Image (cartoon, rainbow, N blue to C red):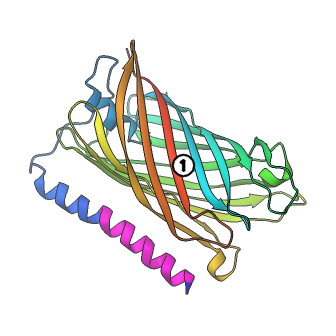
Amino acid sequence: MNSHRAYLSIAVVLAVTLFATTRATAQAPASTPPPVAAPTADAPNSDLAKAVQNPVGNLISVPFQDNVNLNVGPYDRVQNVLNIQPVIPIDITEDWNIITRTIVPIVSQPAVVQNQDRISGIGDIQLSAFLSPAKPGAWIWGAGGVVQAPTHTNSVLGNDHAGLGPSFVILHLEAGSPWVYGVLINNLWSVGNANSPSYSNGLMQPFLNYNFKGGAYLTSVPIITVNWQAKGSQQWTVPIGGGIGKIFRFGKLPVNLQFGGYYNVVRPDFAGNWQLRLQAQLIFPKK
């Protein structure tokens, strides 16, 4: 029953994204839009906001994303995951870039039995690399792979297997349009002969943003995950929700601040039901 709810919830999330896609495309001019250039340091805040909403954008940024997961475990406690996620583009030719995205999770895991201490430390680090056109049009794509390293400082915070798999992103970002929308997909399979259980974990991250003048925007970026080796209702986590964000400048440094809330309409037993997400993203555009 929970699997049916998961598929229905995913369909709803994708339908909303598709509806926005159809609306925005219908309002777009018939002529082919020019390529979207990477913003410079003196670009308007609205251009910077759209640029950082592109997972394969050609600018360096360092997001600090704090995720507060409520009602986790049998005692409904709080889990905190701070993801440090540097994004570094590498120009390989005039026509192609490689965009690297690293996720370093710092986890505070609540106890799952009485009289047990909370465990805090570093989880397993992931690195994604996307090959993407350097001069894209309104439709932008990136394809590559993702690897996971067993860097956890406590066995509760990760898996001793390394992992690898494919990763793909496609999005629509057009000059003059307030909409930025798309989806990022990957899947990780465990490799090696470690003592930990093997895994096959999928991730689908649709994103839908509406931008205002001045660098403010509305956003919805639910992170849908699936554990393919779990059984029945324990496989899927499907959140719905959204938030707000805005580009601020601290001196010459642009910073993207964002806050959102997501409710897991489908989740495994003892997974949190609510997630609060706060992000501060340092932006280093080209000079």
Residue under the image location 37 percent in, 14 percent down: 287
Which SS class for mark 1?
strand
Inspect the magenta stretch and tell me whether residue 3 lies in it: yes
In the image, residue 147 sits, relative to residue 191, either above or below, namely: above
Principal SS element in the magenta part? Answer: helix
Kind of residue at disc 1: Gly
Vertical side of 58 occupied by 126: above or below: below
Q: Is residue 232 visible?
A: yes
Quarter of the image for residue 101 reads top right
The N terminus: image quadrant: bottom right
Q: How many marks?
A: 1
Residue pictured at 32% horizontal, 26% vertical: 39
* Towards the viewer: 204 or 129: 204
Q: Which residues are magenta?
A: 2-17
According to the image, label 1 marks what residue?
A: 144
Q: Is residue 177 left or right of residue 92?
A: left
Q: Position of residue 88 (x, y in %)?
A: 52, 30
Q: Residue at x 35, y 30 (%)?
A: 247
Q: For this view, does 201 lie left or right of residue 178?
A: right
What x and y, as percent, mark residue 163? 72, 54
